[in-house]
Image (tube, rainbow, N blue to C red):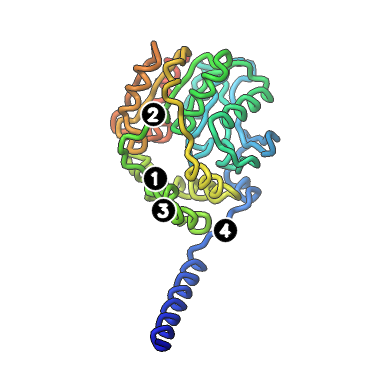
């Protein structure tokens, strides 16, 4: 008996030692926001003190435009996802559009919400406070993925403030057995997901992006590094874990109450939110316009920015 316990104790000790060694090799600390600012801020970047956070945002284009285009990114993303689309739209002098985008609470350089109470109601309150501080009384609101869900919930809460709505591969309806990303699956798995607070290898980020993009040539080392760095920004991993442990529940039955002119854009090869959802949005939002992009995945603004720019400009006009 003693011999068995001795063997068992040795085995357990060996396992603990191996796990400790692996942890010491692969564990990654949070990256201080100040360090990331030097890499991911531009001259257009600004920070707004709001609801206990320093909100990273960019407000570009003519300030005389009183109905700017406001862009909301999705889960585990940042305002950088709009870089290519923004560049194309700003270079078009005929549209002459003001464009505002921000890192939402829990993401990018804005970091976690002090309340740690992520919900569509919270994001709507945040967005309204943000726009009020910029003295934006009305806007054209666009959102991708989770950002799309935030956009249409905000439109229902503040219908007089949204002149037009653009939904891009947006959340809204129950899942339909989509493939999903490896990172999201691990983040949704109890116990295992807690490891992501300490071990978040770039290989996992790359594997997840392979589900997000249909055209794999867009998954460059710079793109992988950006997503990885901003995920490791101080507090962001814990915020992401909170979101996956307590997933937001869209009120799909309320979508048919949207009366705002709406453009629905979707990547036909979206593996995270099936293109079938695009037709549900079109059915429920009366008078909405739908455009499907062939050979495009979950984030058309990164994978097909020129196509999106054309769609957005046509809709705005």
- Looking at the image, residue 137 sits to the left or right of residue 86; the answer is right
Q: Residue at 44% across / 49% down in the picture?
A: 187
**Residue named by callout 2:** 173
Secondary structure type for disc 2: loop
Secondary structure type for disc 4: loop
The answer for how far apart the CA atoms under marks 2 and 3 are is 27 Å
Mark found first going from the N terminus, 2 or 1: 2
The answer for how far apart the CA atoms under marks 4 and 2 are is 36 Å
Mark found first going from the N terminus, 4 or 3: 4
Residue 66 percent coordinates (x, y): 61, 15
The answer for how far apart the CA atoms under marks 2 and 1 are is 22 Å
Mark found first going from the N terminus, 1 or 4: 4
- Residue 77, can we see it? yes
**Residue named by callout 3:** 204
Residue 23, numbered label: none
**Residue named by callout 1:** 209
The image quadrant where one finds the N terminus is bottom left
Task: Farthest residue to the front: give it.
Answer: 1
**Residue named by callout 4:** 29
* Viewer-side residue, 252 vs 312: 252
Q: Residues within 10 Å of mark 1 (few under 14, many from 20)?
A: many
Task: Farthest residue to the bottom: give it.
Answer: 3
Q: Residue at 63% across / 36% down in the picture?
A: 45
Q: Residue at 52% across / 55% down in the picture?
A: 197
Mark found first going from the N terminus, 1 or 3: 3
Relative to 18, is 118 above or below? Answer: above
Residue 96 percent coordinates (x, y): 54, 17
Mark found first going from the N terminus, 2 or 3: 2
- Looking at the image, residue 186 sits to the left or right of residue 154; the answer is left
* Viewer-side residue, 279 vs 303: 279
Mark found first going from the N terminus, 4 or 2: 4
């Amino acid at each position: 008996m003693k011999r068995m316990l001795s063997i068992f104790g040795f085995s357990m000790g060996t396992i603990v030692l191996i796990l400790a060694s692996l942890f010491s090799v692969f564990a990654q600390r949070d990256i201080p926001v100040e360090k990331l600012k030097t890499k991911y801020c531009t001259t257009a970047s600004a920070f707004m003190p709001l609801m206990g956070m320093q909100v990273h945002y960019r407000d570009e284009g003519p300030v005389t435009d009183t109905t700017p285009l406001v862009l909301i990114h999705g889960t585990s993303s940042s305002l950088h996802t709009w870089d290519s689309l923004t560049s194309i739209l700003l270079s078009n002098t005929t549209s002459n559009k003001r464009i505002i985008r921000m890192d939402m609470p829990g993401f990018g350089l804005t970091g976690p919400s002090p309340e740690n109470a992520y919900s569509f109601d919270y994001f709507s309150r945040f967005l309204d406070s943000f726009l009020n501080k910029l003295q934006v009384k009305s806007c054209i609101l666009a959102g991708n993925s989770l950002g799309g869900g935030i956009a249409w919930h905000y439109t229902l809460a503040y219908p007089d403030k949204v002149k037009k709505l653009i939904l891009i591969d947006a959340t809204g309806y129950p899942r339909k057995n989509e493939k999903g990303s490896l990172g999201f699956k691990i983040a949704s798995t109890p116990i295992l997901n807690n490891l992501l607070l300490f071990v978040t290898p770039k290989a996992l980020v790359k594997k997840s992006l392979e589900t997000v993009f249909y055209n794999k040539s867009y998954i460059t080392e710079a793109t992988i590094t950006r997503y990885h760095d901003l995920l490791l920004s101080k507090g962001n991993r814990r915020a992401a874990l909170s979101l996956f442990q307590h997933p937001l529940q869209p009120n799909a039955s309320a979508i048919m109450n949207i009366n705002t002119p709406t453009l629905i854009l979707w990547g036909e090869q979206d593996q995270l939110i099936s293109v079938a959802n695009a037709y549900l949005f079109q059915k429920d939002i009366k008078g909405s316009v739908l455009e499907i992009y062939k050979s495009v995945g979950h984030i058309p603004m990164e994978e097909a920015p020129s196509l999106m720019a054309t769609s957005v400009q046509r809709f705005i006009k």
